[in-house]
Amino acid sequence: MAGAGRQLRLSAWGRVLATHPQVVLAAKVAVAVAAAFLVVQLLPGFAKQYPYYAPLGALIAVTGTVAGSLRESAQAIVAILLGAPIAWLVDLAFPTNVATLAAVVALATLASRWSWLGTKAGWAPVAALFVMMVGGGQPGAYVAAYLGLTSLGAVIGFAVDLALPALPLNATQAVVNRLRETLADQLDDLAEGLLREQPLTWDEWVERQREISPLAGQMRRMVAHTDEARRGNWRAARWRGEAERQHRQAQAMEELAAQVRDMTGVVTHGERAELDAVALGPAVRPYAAHTLEAMAETLRSAHGSTADPELLHRTDDALRRLVEEIRSDRCRTGDDMFGAGELVMTLRRALAALAPEDLDATVPSRQPAD
């Protein structure tokens, strides 16, 4: 029993690491900073006077990905190379006072406007300020210590990222899954609202609208981070198939997020109690609701970039019944039914996005509209 309990605890800890990459990043930062501090203790000369710059360089370098570590280390070192010499030259030519301090920071800030420096641009004025304020009467020695020890720490940080590269597939998949469930829940909410006897008010529809855009943005950032994490990562080859499958699924969810937002707009703006003429009407509303429910079920079955074929066919049948009812209602009432037609086209695109290529011939909604 003790062994089983220990295994369960380890399994739970493993899940935490898999779904919370910031925990792994924090551990790697701690290892890199500690290693840099230990290494600098072994060095002679100015390293003894400024030992804190090596851990600082390690802190700068560790980003969680090999490519990111290399890029941000280089950006920080270049920014320091821009700012420190400016302060050094000014210190040699002029006495240190408020005016020279302000001028040095201003010049270093202008030098840091180079877009390639990215988020590390601020290190240029920081380096200049440190040289002026801490360098004292030995700016040359201080610049060498600052730049050398920071670079040493950055190399150590990069080595930690290289030895323990992250590949946050589990964390990214968790976000993809959360978006998929949110989209399906949104479709269910729309369907439930359409099954009411009377159209909902605008306020009632607002209560049923999910936050899709922020979650889709988070998914895009996570997928981009995972793609970057594959570069220079010796673990990436082992998980290439899973990473590519996840990328395709994320692309499908991105497309579906746009389509679900469109469906939500058609329903909430066009089928409201405040309107004299609604988009669907009492005869079409139940068919639209059943199609949305079927689409939600199909979406939940999509654990890759495609959904369950049986559910795809079921949703396609519901969609065809919706189309037939729209045509019948248009003949009975003479209404244009533009809103209903827009909903149908969006549903067709969503269904096509979830269907594998070999279902082209058997799922009519994969075919071009008449």
Image (cartoon, rainbow, N blue to C red):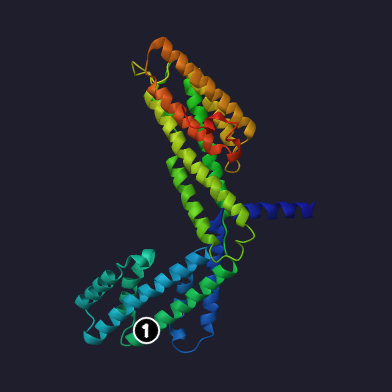
Q: Residue at x 57, y 24 (%)?
A: 317
Position of residue 313 in the picture relative to residue 133 (left or right): right
Q: Name the residue type under label 1.
A: Tyr
Q: Is residue 215 above or below residue 225?
A: above
Viewer-closest of 211 and 184: 184
Give percent across and percent down for residue 130. Answer: 34, 76
Label 1: element kind: helix
Residue at numbered disc 1:
142
Viewer-closest of 182 and 116: 116
Q: Is residue 344 above or below residue 34?
A: above
In the rendered image, the residue lying farthest to the left is 99
Give percent across and percent down for residue 274. Answer: 34, 19
Displayed quadrant of residue 83: bottom left
Give percent across and percent down for residue 139. Answer: 32, 85
Q: Is residue 309 above or below residue 156?
A: above
**Can you see residue 39?**
yes
In the rendered image, the residue lying farthest to the bottom is 45
Q: Residue at x 50, y 24 (%)?
A: 191
Q: Residue at x 37, y 84 (%)?
A: 142
Q: Is residue 370 above or below residue 220?
A: above
Position of residue 43 in the picture relative to residue 75 (left or right): right
